[in-house]
Image (cartoon, grey):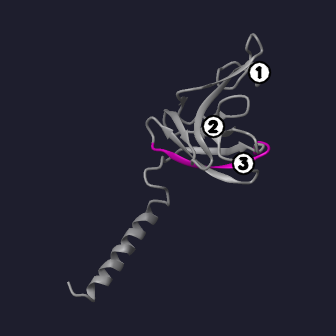
Amino acid sequence: MSRRARPRVLLVGIAMLLLGASACGGRAGGEATGVEVDGAWARTTPPEAVDGAAYLTVTVPADDRLVAATVPGSVATAAVLHATTGGDANGGGDGHHGGGGASGAVTMAEVGGVDLRAGEAYAFAPGGSHVMLVGLRGPLVTGTRFPMVLEFTRGAPYTVRVTVRVNPPRG
């Protein structure tokens, strides 16, 4: 191949790569398709807070299990799936959304995963299931955003943008 032909071949190759990437719909490589996440938010924290919480609603296209969430190390040292049980937080007692403990005490515990049913929205909400942000690297400031990666048993990881807010989003 001549020296003059090499740059053209290189340009054609780059154009083909870009065209192929645009045909993929702009998703990150290997990211879950059909997953819907609504209202991803984290509550604003005071400067001295060491932990925070993130909330969202997840819907998957096929039965799956959410087994982990991760955030950048610049946000927190870990993101852990938690469930709140007991008390009267939401009036229920399903172990996922608070409620109804005999002693009235509210407890929070790490869970190994959350079963998700195809087409059914699962809410991580105040007083119930949530993603605990452990070891905050600084306060969660209203209006800032950070990525959180959701990891599933069957589906590919899914990245969502979490917005820090004082109150839950309406809608």
Residue at image mark 1 = 91
Whichever of callouts 2 and 1 sits on the residue coming sooner in the sequence is: 1
Please name whichever residue, 13 or 144, is drawn nearer the observer in this view of the structure. 144
The residue type indicated by label 1 comes to: Gly
Q: Magenta segment: does it hold 30?
A: no
Q: CA distance from mark 3 to mark 2?
A: 16 Å
Q: Residue at x 48, y 46 (%)?
A: 32
Q: Is residue 118 left or right of residue 99?
A: left
User: Crowding at label 1, few (<14), some or many (≥20) Cα neighbours within 10 Å?
Assistant: few
> Residue 136, position in %: x, y?
66, 42
Report the span colored magenta: 156-171
Q: Is residue 28 visible in this depiction of the protein?
A: yes
Q: Which mark is residue 134?
A: 2
Residue at image mark 3 = 164
Whichever of callouts 1 and 3 sits on the residue coming sooner in the sequence is: 1
User: Crowding at label 2, few (<14), some or many (≥20) Cα neighbours within 10 Å?
Assistant: some
Q: Magenta segment: does it hold 168?
A: yes
Q: Is residue 171 visible in this depiction of the protein?
A: no
Q: Can you tell which quarter of the image residue 101 is in? A: top right
Q: CA distance from mark 2 to mark 1?
A: 27 Å
